[in-house]
């Protein structure tokens, strides 16, 4: 099973700020040791598979970006449009988001195969992003995230992981 | 050789001006903008003759032209009506043509495609949909009277204030 609950507060004031709180839970299976969703390295033969397989995706961070299975994701974010009075930049949204990850079943795997320890704390991530609708047919996006692994990761693989994504979308 | 000849004919046809059918058609004389909008709003479709009157009123505040042909020429000279269009006084106004005329009349900034290739019905409609001046629908769909009045109202507000009103007719302070 899975749950996704989101609370958005968007007061109608200058710069159109938005505060978001979200909780995502997806059940896991304690004997899925290598993968939360695939058959190979998946559920132990003869046992019931309680891992959740998701279709589609949710925003679970740009750096770790775990699949929604065997995980709790707690997130909080803030975004706003700081340049509303500048015509060219009026639709530029700047925002930040924090994610905290925890395994649902500490013995089971999450989609990042290096989180092999039997420990619930996966880690946390900080994201910064910019979404800019330049014109009706041109949009730019940039997102940076830094993930700090927790006790679910082995000692040698606990360095901060960073990821930068940027894209220009031209629709016609 | 045959293909080259055919392409030449198409290009030659595109370079000529569009035809005006029923150019002598008239409308109710001395109809002010309020009476015009009241009459149009109850119609299920809008004729191109009425549409041209609406655009002339939008730009000049009144329509002093006597015939459809005069309205078309006045709007063509201001590039609100494309010189390539075949227009008919009794023909139905389509969303693409309305979007083109409103885009040209309001001189609102467009996207990359409009900047590179100039106005076209398809991209003017997309621009106006993006700016919430027009609703969803295809280029060739006829425009209802009520929608026409709503679009004229939004365009008039944009010309006066530079902003598109929201659903409640309000603009930002």
Image (cartoon, coloured by chain):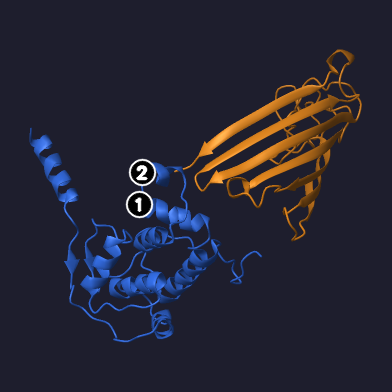
Chain colours: A orange, B blue
> How far apart, in angstroms, are the residues tagged by discs 1 and 2?
8 Å
Which residue is at the far top?
A156
Q: Nearer the viewer, residue B158 or B38?
A: B158
Left or right, B129 with reference to A97: left
Q: Where is residue B140 in the image (x, y as percent from the top left)?
A: 34, 60
How many residues crowd mark 2 within 10 Å: few (<14), some (14–19), many (20+)? Answer: few
Residue A49 drawn above or below residue B66: above
Left or right, A166 with reference to B76: right
Q: Which chain carries label 1?
A: B
Q: What element carries label 1?
A: loop
Residue A27 drawn above or below residue B58: above
Q: Quadrant of the N terminus of chain B?
A: top left
Q: Which residue is drawn at 86% across and 29% down?
A: A123
Q: Where is residue B111 in the image (x, y as percent from the top left)?
A: 47, 46
Q: Which residue is drawn at 24% across and 79% down?
A: B66
Q: Position of residue B71 (x, y in %)?
A: 27, 71
Q: Residue at x 72, y 30 (%)?
A: A144
Q: Mark 2 points at which residue?
A: B117
Residue B103 visible in the picture: yes
Q: Mark 1 points at which residue?
A: B120
Count of numbered circles in the view: 2
Q: CB atoms at circles 1 and 2 under 8 Å apart? A: yes
Q: Position of residue A56 (x, y in %)?
A: 65, 41
Q: Which of B145 and A16 is in front in this view?
A: A16
Please check whether the numbered discs 1 and 2 fall on a single chain: yes
Q: Mark 2 lies on which chain?
A: B
Residue A55 visible in the picture: no
């Amino acid at each position: 099973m899975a749950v996704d609950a989101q609370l958005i507060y968007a007061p109608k004031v200058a710069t159109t700020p938005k505060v978001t709180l979200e909780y995502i839970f997806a059940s896991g299976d304690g004997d899925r040791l290598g993968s939360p969703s695939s058959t190979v390295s998946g559920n132990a033969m003869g046992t019931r598979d309680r891992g959740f397989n998701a279709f589609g995706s949710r925003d679970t961070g740009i750096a770790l970006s775990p699949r929604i299975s065997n995980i709790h994701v707690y997130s909080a974010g803030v975004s706003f449009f700081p340049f509303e009075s500048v015509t060219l930049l009026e639709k530029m949204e700047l925002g930040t988001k924090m994610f905290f990850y925890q395994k649902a079943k500490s013995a089971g795997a999450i989609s990042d195969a290096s989180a092999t320890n039997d420990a619930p704390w996966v880690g946390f991530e900080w994201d910064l992003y910019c979404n800019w609708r330049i014109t009706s047919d041109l949009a730019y996006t940039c997102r940076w995230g830094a993930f700090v692994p927790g006790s679910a990761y082995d000692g040698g693989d606990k360095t901060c992981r960073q990821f930068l994504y940027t894209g220009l979308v031209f629709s016609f | 050789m045959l293909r080259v000849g055919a392409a030449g004919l198409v290009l030659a046809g595109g370079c000529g001006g569009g035809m005006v059918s029923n150019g002598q058609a008239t409308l109710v004389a001395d109809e002010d903008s309020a009476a015009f909008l009241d009459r149009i709003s109850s119609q299920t479709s809008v004729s191109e003759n009425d549409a041209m009157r609406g655009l002339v009123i939008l730009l000049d505040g009144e329509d002093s032209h006597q015939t459809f042909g005069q309205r078309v020429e006045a709007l063509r000279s201001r590039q609100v009506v494309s010189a390539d269009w075949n227009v008919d006084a009794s023909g139905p106004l389509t969303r693409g043509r309305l979007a083109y005329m409103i885009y040209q009349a309001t001189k609102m900034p467009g996207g990359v495609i409009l900047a590179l290739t100039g106005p076209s019905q398809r991209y003017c409609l997309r621009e106006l949909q993006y700016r919430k001046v027009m609703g969803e629908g295809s280029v060739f769909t006829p425009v209802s009277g009520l929608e026409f009045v709503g679009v004229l109202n939004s365009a008039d507000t944009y010309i006066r204030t530079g902003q598109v009103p929201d659903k409640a007719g309000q603009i930002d302070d």
